[in-house]
Amino acid sequence: MPFLTNRKTQPTYDVIVVGSGAAGGQTAYTLTMAGAKVLMVEAGRNYDPVKETPMFQTDAQAPLRAAGTPDKDLGFYDSTVDGGWNVPGEPFTNASSDPKRQFTWWRARMLGGRTNHWGRISLRNGPYDFKGYSRDGLGFDWPISYDDVAPYYDKVEMLVGIYGNNDGLENTPNSSPGVLLPPPAMRAGELLARQRAKGLGIPVISAHRAVLSVKQDADNIPAKLHPGNPRAQRILAEAMRSRAACFWATDCGRGCSIKANYQSPTVHLPPALATGNLDILTDAMVREVTLDENGKATGIVYVDRFTGEERRVSARVVVLAASSCETVRILLNSKSPRFPNGVANSSGTVGKYIMDTVATSLSGQIPALENLPPTHDDGAGGIHVYVPWWLYGEQHAGKLDFARGYHLEFSTGRRMPNLGTASGLEWLTGGSFGRAFKEDARRYYGSFISFGGRGDMVPNEDCFCELDPTVKDKWGIPVLRFHWKWSDQELRQVAHQQKSIAAIIESMGGKVRTPPAADPSTVIRPGGNVKHEVGGARMGSDPKKSVTNAFGQTWDVKNLFLTDAAPFCSNADKNPTLTIMALAWRASDYLLEELRRGNL
Amino acid sequence: MDRRTAITWMLTAVAAAAVLERDALAAEPAKSPAAKGYGPDPDLLKDYKPGDLWPLTLTAEQRITTAALCDVIIPADAKSPSASAVGVPDFIDEWISAPYPGHDRDRTIILTGLAWLEAESQRRFQGDFSNLVLRQKNAICEDICYLPKAKAEFKSAAEFFKKFRDLTAGGFYTTPAGMKDLGYIGNVPIATFAGPSPEVLQRLGLA
């Protein structure tokens, strides 16, 4: 079973998985390795990172020195295909015309979705992150605890390969011994930040990222991940051996032709395809889940992007893993007499409590980093260190005016020069030009540090999406309309982020580019802008108030599962991808067991 | 430059100066010729040159001024060549000719600014900017090189200079010569990532 370039699907499957990113990839991997026959349906085109990644291209080889444009929002070499803030012919709408009340929605229409370009930052949620309501009375508890997910974090980390340290800090869990790959050495600016921030009581520790700092242990990991399944072990060992370790050059956002970082098309899909149990249908836009007269899911309807034709496929189980908001859209568009407001929506909460990451940026210039000798700073194509949230105690004691924490990510170093490297230097140079400017460019290159805050958002009633009553996409499918409003919780947190960042920059002897903003609403990044949108079909223990159970199985339709971030009950400061994969694996194990028992 | 061209230049420059005084940012953007972008799924492995995707639009005269100003900002020195020697004027032309939002605005700023620069050269030194001696070129640039300190009559020209310097620097330091000048040594595979050298650690007080 392969890529269905002839567009001919099998008469039926065990499971249809909608989406091919972190959730779809993990779900299809777990199911096919266990022998289930799976059809993966992807809205975008096929994509092969081995052949298509621009590994060593420089900005001078790209149009406009690789600057972002509406065709490639994050720059020419960002791996996103046919996507971005706007997808041609596939709009979404906002209920409010006020920019502060609007949601921005990043989509990728390609095999592997956003796993191709993501930052590879792979932090575990901690115990508090699953029990927010119990801890501070805000938001919701998950129906699961950290201990339920911990074994799956270990498995995913071993499968995809995560570098990092076990630092044993509060609510920043360790992995099991032997799971993590060694973290890369810290860059000069990272070491300086660590030394100086320590004086402020702020920790700087190794980041966890999905990059192979060394090759994976293909001799031992497969048996740990697939005990009693020699075929799966063999397939995985071969897949692991085909991945190279990082060679410390090029940015991960381009993707990776040597498969050193995690992206679904190089890590999840090759072994899944090698089982012979996976068909992949690309360029197929899923419109709805179909039901029989008993309310069981029978399959899906999709629009073939080549012909515009509507087609059906059937399966015993349907899994939506289309990214949280797209999954919500499919649920809401699956209307029937039994479910007039969309399938699995008897609670009326589908589309509610969507969240993003609370974020702001601040940068500065560090004189100590000026004129350093040439140094290799490309590193692992992303961050090597970060600042985990360090004020759990103060926050819990009521000493802060916001309830949830954040971490800081930052970049420094003598990275590949780009369009911005020597621009906007006047605040330091007083406007030099000529030979003096060339000296200034040399002096300041590599002396900047840029921070981003990444914080936990409390879910609220004002952040939701629904079907737009009139607007449809080019396939005739109703689109989402968003509602958004940050609460004071997020605005106060952002004010704190800015002050902390400024304090770290100043502790390094640096100058901030712009002082912390007096009004945090002017510097908080818009809803959706961090592309960490989660929620919209939350899991719970009460079918009247939630959409799925603790395994992503919808309460209303027992053979319909959601394995992306739609069931998230909170959005910890930790980047969501690792948790998406861990929960997708856990849901898939449960799904397989229920199939075996004949319960689906 | 013949007399007819010179008169045209002067008229353009006078008109441009008037626009600058009104505020270049509020001016109606000069439309670039209809052209299409590269779309949401371009070939990322191809080597692109300015002009491959949309036509370049600077006139021959504008190109001469552009190259001259590029080299006032980034002249050749012992470490690296000048900006014009590594094709930066082509990049600036590509930039202001691009069919994307924001580029129209930059086009207005740059074209209006180039016209102002020629007019100012004629006014102060009775010559084309490119033919002035470095001391004369510098004298004009000194007045417009730093927006916060520019006199009121030079504010708009200083906005132009800021944009032009950013584009020149961006164009230059992304070339192999520019990267070498800065001492960038990455973008090549290496076997191990060792972190900073003992010398760097010592300099930072981290040894």
Image: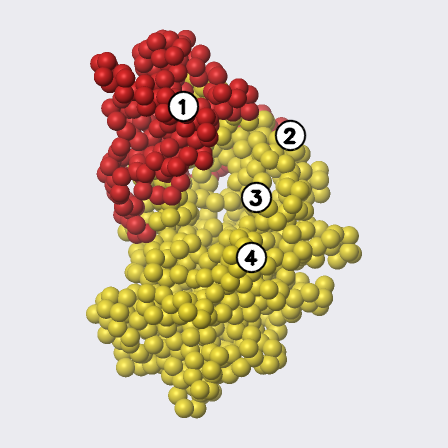
Q: In which quarter of the image is residue A4?
A: bottom left
Counting residues from the N terminus, which is met first, the one under dot 2 or under dot 4?
Answer: 4
Are both tags, 3 and 2, on one chain? yes
Report the mark closest to the observer, 1 or 2.
Answer: 1
Could you tell me if residue A160 is visible in this image? yes
Q: What residue type is labelled 2?
A: Gly
> Would you name the residue on which mark 3 appears?
A361
Q: What element carries label 4?
A: helix
Q: Which chain is yellow?
A: A
Q: How far apart are marks 3 and 2 (CA)?
A: 19 Å
Callouts 1 and 2 close, C-beta under 8 Å = no
User: From the viewer's perspective, is A535 left or right of B28?
Assistant: right
- Where is residue B108 drawn, in percent x and y? 37, 32
Q: Which chain carries label 1?
A: B
> Would you name the residue on which mark 4 appears?
A101
Q: How far apart are marks 1 and 3 (CA)?
A: 38 Å
Q: Hue of chain B? A: red
Residue at the image position 34 percent from the left and 15 percent from the top:
B129
Q: Which amino acid does label 3 sit on?
A: Ser
Name the quadrant of the C terminus of chain A: bottom left
